[in-house]
Image (cartoon, helix red, strand yellow):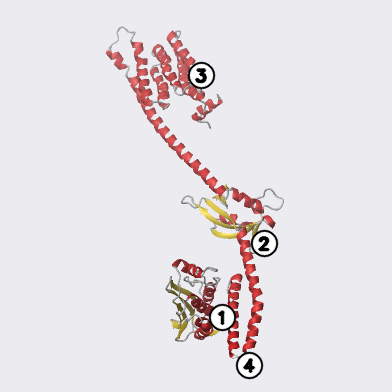
Amino acid sequence: MDKLLDVLVLGKRSFHDLSMRGRVVLSQMPLNLTLGLVWGIMAFVHEEPMHLEFLVGQGLGILLLGLCAALPWDRIPYGLFLVIPFLDLIPIALVRASAADVVPGLGLLAVFPMMWLAGSGIHPKIMVPAGGVAVLLMVWLPLLGRSDLGLRDLVGELVTPFLMLAIAVAVSVMTKSGMEQQSHIAELLERSEMRERILETILDTVDVGVVAFDADGRDILFNLRLRDFYRAALPEGADDAPEAELVVVDEATGELVPPRRRPAARAIAGEVFTHEIVRLGRGKTARTVSVSARPLGGAEAGPAGTVLAFSDVTDVVAAVRAKDSFVASMSHEFRTPLTSIRGYAELLLDDPALPAGARADVLVIDRSARHLQLMVDEVLAAATGTVASVLWTPIDLAELVREAAASATPEAASRGISFQVRTSGDVRLHGDRTAMIRTVDNLVSNAIKYSGDGREVRLSTARENGWVVLTVSDDGIGMSQADVNSVFTRFHRSSAAKVAGIPGIGLGMALAREVAEQHGGRLECVSRLGEGTTFTLRIPGASMPPQPSPGAGTQAGRAD
């Protein structure tokens, strides 16, 4: 009963929240309430005793309401409750026939059963016409007992059935439209729930922690992986803690990140960032994560919130550190014996009594040791991250090129490779002599390494519009465009070099590009597979102040 009253007074419950019995009783109740009102009016204005027909009609109405409340409609085949509105026309007809002279228009009571029939949505093409016929019989049957019945009397009673039929048609149309909309909404809701389940499943499956905040900074979505990160960031011994008390450590400094500078606080404030590295927690359970934040799309007024993604990079950071430590350690370990080898080789070369044949052998030892030391320097530079600071001194690039060609001639001659060296113009510059020597040696060594036997390597220097330009060309194996696009990546080696079995570690060209950029220049490359490669080094000339250009672009080339 409480539920029925709540629906009647338009409370929190809706009609469809009721049981089948409650809905049937509620559909019948308006007619009974109106019949009760008619009874009250008759008792107040009608001085004579009630007609038997009136009492019978009222009793039948009460009986039908009792049936609605007593029958187990949930266990009765659906749709049989529509017998009730047809039976309602009987008490309506009796009340109308006995009280029409006191309360006119009682035939309009038929609107209640007609709305029930039309609003049920069950076979409206049958129920609506059948209801119209039933109302017509309701108004005609009482006339059939009259001796003076004429056609005028029958036609005069058509208004009520026609009005009820029109109302029923209108209700039926609206009910059908409402049911279609409800079905569409239910379908959309089901799709939405399915997508939500799919999204939750995907988020709980991926190995990325995801959290979404609304515009007010409240978390509205987070997955299981994020819970793991949350537990890792909890203070020692705590089972729960607010975000401001979580242990979030700056990976670079090792100090706690202030609450306002933490990824979540910055994202809620509207900041967008990518791959911010922080460490969650301390000790063995700590996790190093890469955090990115993006705004959550909303209305035109602005973002509806923000989304953060946490990727676990603990193992990656540990591997990089281990690699850098190993490379740096091994590079330093190599330096000691190499220094000894080169030192003793220089002592032997300074001995005037050294035979010519032995001198040639010592030169090979010294050249090989110098080449190995060059590789060690490259590995060490890669391990430390950048090329050392530039020590500005005047440099004649043509002189460096001639020295590099002379040093590489024995190695080239052993394979029948010849040098063509052309220098023109003033090619002096300001720069770090050691770094430039290493860069030129790298370019020359690279050309020899990838040239075919008996080919030619061309070296040329020139001055172009204030730039000192070195061009190194070979007719070797060349590179595909895919390798050209990746060659300046450290430790990258071209596919052609791997297939040909040419040794190298993939650092020479990457470090050469860094030297060029540190001198305010750039290193360019043009290469075609099977046709050779041309490297072009451009450095500001001595007449230009050495200003490094932050945006100095590079084009990909071939790595050692």
Of all residues shown, which one is farthest toward the left?
A: 151
Gap in angstroms between the C-alphas marked 3 and 4: 127 Å
User: What's the residue type where badge 2 is placed?
Assistant: Glu
> In the drawing, does residue 437 fall left or right of residue 92?
right
User: Is residue 16 visible to the viewer in this orientation of the structure?
Assistant: yes
Whole-percent x, y for residue 144 in the image: 33, 10
Q: Nearer the viewer, residue 446 or 32?
A: 446
Q: What's the amino acid at mark 1?
A: Asp
Query: Mark 3 to mark 1: distance in Å?
Result: 102 Å
Of the two numbered discs 4 and 1 in the rendering, the one whose residue sits closer to the viewer: 4
Q: Nearer the viewer, mark 2 or mark 1?
A: 1
Q: Quadrant of residue 462?
A: bottom left
The residue that disc 1 covers is: 432
Q: Which residue is mark 2?
A: 255
> Tag 1 or tag 4, which sits nearer the N-term?
4
The residue that label 4 is drawn on is 353
Residue 71: which numbered mark, if any? 3
Disc 1 is placed on an element classified as loop
- For the point 63% across and 93% down, the residue is 353
Point 48% across, 39% down: residue: 190
Label 2 to label 3, Cα distance in Å? 74 Å
- State which tag comes first along the sequence, 3 or 1: 3
